């Protein structure tokens, strides 16, 4: 089987010592495309560098809400402007995160809106990070539409976000989070979302799936995500693996 990793951070320093070894292990498992995702200025530049280095890598660039005090949408525009753009395929990850900081909601919103605007200017899709912030995510996307595609990474389904996904044909990515016991409630939502709107990710180095939870993650764990999805959707694992693989090419407008 072949796998398309739609969200990983191989720009993270935890891979400094053995990145080639890790990636070769993933490739042996059948992973043949990687979207490496930036979360601030520095990591976005690194994303582009990785996509220059590896033919199977593509870059997403953006400022995560955690970095709202440090970087701006203009920083991301400048990177785009200065670098070779061929392999920049999305603006991300961008959005809201209220898990740790809630007192800068307005700033997070402003940064998110500016980056949606930037994505529209550059004709790129957006990769959304939304944690404990489904209502504000919902309202912001109602206010400003990303014209070239919307993907919820590490999707945390809720009634309102699923409604939005269904109404607008947005894409969702599931990762190791669906294998965690406490997320068994996801099944009812996963049942509602059409197969052609679903892709897979690992969010490496985070969110390692069961039974490896807590370990450093990498894209060789993608089959575990497919297995759980197949179980929830009650479809053959091979079948779902093939479908989510093709969906990722559609979303990122990459030709196989
Ligand atoms: Zn994220
Ligand atoms: Zn991420």
Image: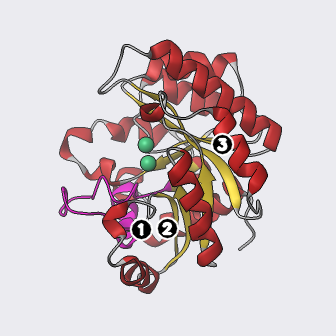
Which one is in front, 61 or 207? Answer: 61
Local SS, label 3: helix
Q: Which residue is mark 3?
A: 76
Q: Nearer the viewer, mark 3 or mark 2?
A: 3
Residue 28 magenta: no
Choose the circle earlier in sequence order: 3 or 1.
3
Residue 218: image quadrant is bottom left
Q: Is residue 25 above or below residue 182?
A: below
Q: Mark yes or no: residue 224 visible.
A: no
Q: Main secondary structure of the magenta part?
A: loop
Q: Position of residue 225 (x, y in %)?
A: 36, 60
The part of the image, by quadrant, that contains residue 164 is: top right
Residue sitting at x 77%, y 64%: 86
- Point out residue 246 in the picture as x, y percentages from the top left corner: 63, 65
Question: Is residue 252 shown above or below 116?
Answer: below
Mark 2, secondary structure of its residue: helix
Give the residue drawn at x 39%, y 66%: 222
Residue behind mark 2:
241
Label 2 crowd bin: few (<14), some (14–19), many (20+), radius 10 Å: many
Decide: is 41 above or below 112. Answer: below
Q: How many marks?
A: 3
The residue tagged 1 is 237
The range drawn in magenta is: 200-229
Q: Is residue 253 left or right of residue 70?
A: right
CB contact under 8 Å: marks 2 and 1: yes
How busy is the neighbourhood of tag 1: few (under 14 within 10 Å), some, or many (20 plus)?
some
Instruction: Give the label, 2 or 1, closer to the camera.
Output: 2
């Amino acid at each position: 089987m072949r796998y398309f990793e739609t969200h990983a951070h191989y720009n993270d320093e935890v891979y400094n010592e053995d990145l080639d070894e890790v990636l070769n292990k993933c490739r042996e498992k059948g992973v043949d495309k990687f979207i490496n995702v930036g979360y601030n200025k520095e990591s976005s530049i690194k994303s582009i560098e990785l996509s220059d280095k590896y033919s199977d890598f593509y870059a997403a660039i953006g400022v995560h809400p955690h970095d709202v005090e440090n970087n701006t949408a203009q920083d991301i525009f400048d990177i785009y402007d200065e670098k070779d753009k061929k392999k920049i395929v999305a603006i991300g990850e961008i959005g809201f995160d209220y898990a740790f900081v809630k007192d800068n909601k307005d700033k997070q919103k402003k940064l998110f809106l500016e980056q949606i605007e930037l994505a529209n200017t550059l004709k790129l899709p957006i990769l959304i990070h939304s944690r404990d912030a489904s209502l504000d995510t919902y309202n912001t996307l109602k206010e400003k539409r990303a014209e070239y595609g919307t993907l919820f990474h590490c999707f945390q389904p809720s009634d309102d976000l699923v409604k939005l996904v269904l109404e607008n044909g947005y894409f969702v990515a599931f990762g190791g989070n669906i294998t965690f016991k406490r997320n068994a409630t996801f099944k009812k939502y996963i049942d509602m979302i059409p197969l052609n709107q679903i892709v897979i990710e690992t969010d490496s180095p985070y969110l390692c799936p069961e039974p490896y939870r807590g370990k450093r993650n990498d894209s060789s764990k993608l089959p575990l995500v497919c297995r759980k999805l197949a179980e929830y959707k009650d479809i053959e694992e091979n079948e779902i693996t093939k479908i989510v693989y093709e969906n990722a090419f559609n979303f990122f407008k990459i030709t196989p």
